[in-house]
Every structure is written in structure tokens, then in C-alpha cells.
Amino acid sequence: MAAIGDASLPAHRGSDLPQLDSPKRVSIAIAGNIGAGKSTLVEFLTSTYGVAPFFEPNDDNPYLADFYEDMDAWAFHSQIFFLAHKFRIHQDLEKTPGVVVQDRTIYEDAEIFATALYKSKRLTERDWRTYEELYRTICNSLRPPDLLIYLSCSLKTTKQRIKLRGRAMEQAIPTPYLRLLQDLYDRWLERWTACEVLRLDTDRLDYISDLVDRLDVMERIERLLPKETLVRQSLQGASAA
């Protein structure tokens, strides 16, 4: 059976991006592994540009705690919840004028996390086929983001951040599982052609407390979006999250 990643998504390369100006919607997606700093970047962009944030519904997932306790039993339930709620978020941001920024996309749910569970035999073949069909159907109705910002960091940094933020259900995530997620992210980005990708190494960049890094990140983002799409409101960074 073909992997989800083999399915074609709408192929809008960077040069084909529509030249959108506010108040028309421009969508920025933040992607990256667990602990890469996605929520922190969303808060930074929100405070700097006044964009509309859309966060990942982790705290709303009633299966998540059970999933981390027993991945085999709860993987399908948890992934279906995320898929449904991410689709709703995509629908909501489509209705929001101006610039919107999303913390993790529906594509990552399928191409990274559900695929990892299938490869590690946490999802049965039957559940995988059901999930894949639903994901492909949803994808046909989605408009891809105008810019994808990918946050990379080392596995060592990922584990340190998971420990520091202290979410109990994340503490027992096995290292091989985190490594598999990173490998799937690398493969997914090699295939991604739906929009421009800006890669930020969060091992090195400190755009919260370092003014030089902050300005560097802002300028790199602004260069990849239509002129005057983002209007700086402040040079004060968001609080780390």
C-alpha cells in the first residue's frame, strides 16, 4: 500500500504563490517536531505582527493521556480526533481575514504522526486504510499555506525541552519514537512543494531574548511574503512557551 506521503498535494511552488494583500487572508504554518518551539514562535508572531493565532488542540484531546499510556489501544482514536479538529481549524482560518498563523498543520498529523504509528505497528492495517482514505478526502478540500516555517532542532535539544516543559504525558516518549518522527519530517519536507519553506534552526536562534536573532527571523519571514503583508507592531518578543 502506498504511503500517505506518496499522495500528491496541490503543487503551488513559491513562484506561483498568489500576491495577497491584507485584509485578504494569508496563511503561515509552523511545523516541527515535539519541543521544536512552535507555540513560542506563534506567540512571537502574534505579539510582533498582530496576526490571528490558531493553536494545536492538544489539551482538548480526550484520548491523549490514554494514548501515551497504551499507544496500541488508543492510537487510532487519538489520531482521528486530531484529524477532525485540525480540519475544523483549517475551516476556521479560511474564514479569518488578514494574516493567520497555525501551530502544526493537518499535513503533519498524517504525514508524520499517523505514519509513525503505522510504521511502528501501533495502527493496524485496517485502521490505517480508514485513516488514509479520510485524510486524502480532506486534503482535496484544503488550500495549502502561503508560507511554511519549519523549526528544526537536534534530538538532544528535543529531549531537553520535553523535560523542561514538564508535561507528564510526554516524559515517557521513547527516544526511538522521537528519532522516527524526525526522520519522517525530513522525508516529508523533501516532498513538500505546496508553498515556500523557511527553515529555522532553533538550536541556535534565540528570537525571544536576542534582538539580533529576532530581527533576523523577522526579516527572513517578511522577504517570503507579499509586500506589506506583515506590519510590525513591536520588537518585544513573546514569552517562551
Image (cartoon, grey):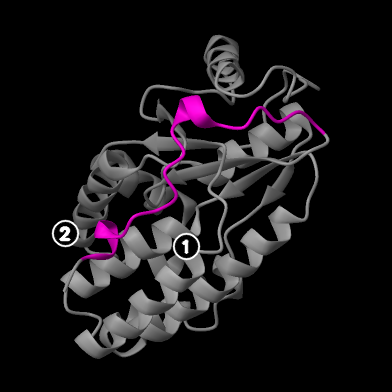
Crowding around mark 1 (Cα neighbors within 10 Å: few <14, some 14 to 19, many 20+) is few
Q: Position of residue 142 (x, y in %)?
A: 55, 58
What percent of the width, then of the height, locates residue 97? 80, 45
**Which element type, helix, strand or loop, lies under badge 2?**
helix
Name the residue type under label 1. Answer: Arg
Residue 70 visible in the displayed image? no
Does 233 sit above or below residue 1?
above
The quarter of the picture where the C terminus appears is top right
Report the residue at 73% width, 27% height from top.
48
* Residue placed under numbered mark 1 in the picture: 167
Q: Residue at x 45, y 45 (%)?
A: 31
Left or right? Give the position of 77 relative to 47.
left
Residue type indicated by callout 2: Pro
State which quadrant residue 70 falls in.
bottom left
Q: Is residue 79 above or below residue 112?
A: below
Residue 100 included in the magenta stretch of the image: no
Q: Position of residue 44 (x, y in %)?
A: 65, 33
Total count of labels: 2
- Closer-to-camera residue (166/239): 239
Side (left or right) of 71 relative to 64? left
Q: For residue 178, what is the image quadrant?
A: bottom left
Q: Is residue 119 visible?
A: yes
Checking the image for residue 176, the label placed there is 2
Horizontal arrangement in the rendering, residue 2 relative to residue 158 (left or right): left
Q: Which residues are magenta?
A: 3-22
> Which quadrant holds the N terminus?
bottom left
The residue at 37%/78% (across/down) is 133
Is 154 above or below relative to 139?
above
Against 118, is 158 above or below? above
Q: Is residue 19 magenta?
A: yes
Mark 2, Cα crowd under 10 Å, few <14 / some 14-19 / many 20+, is: few
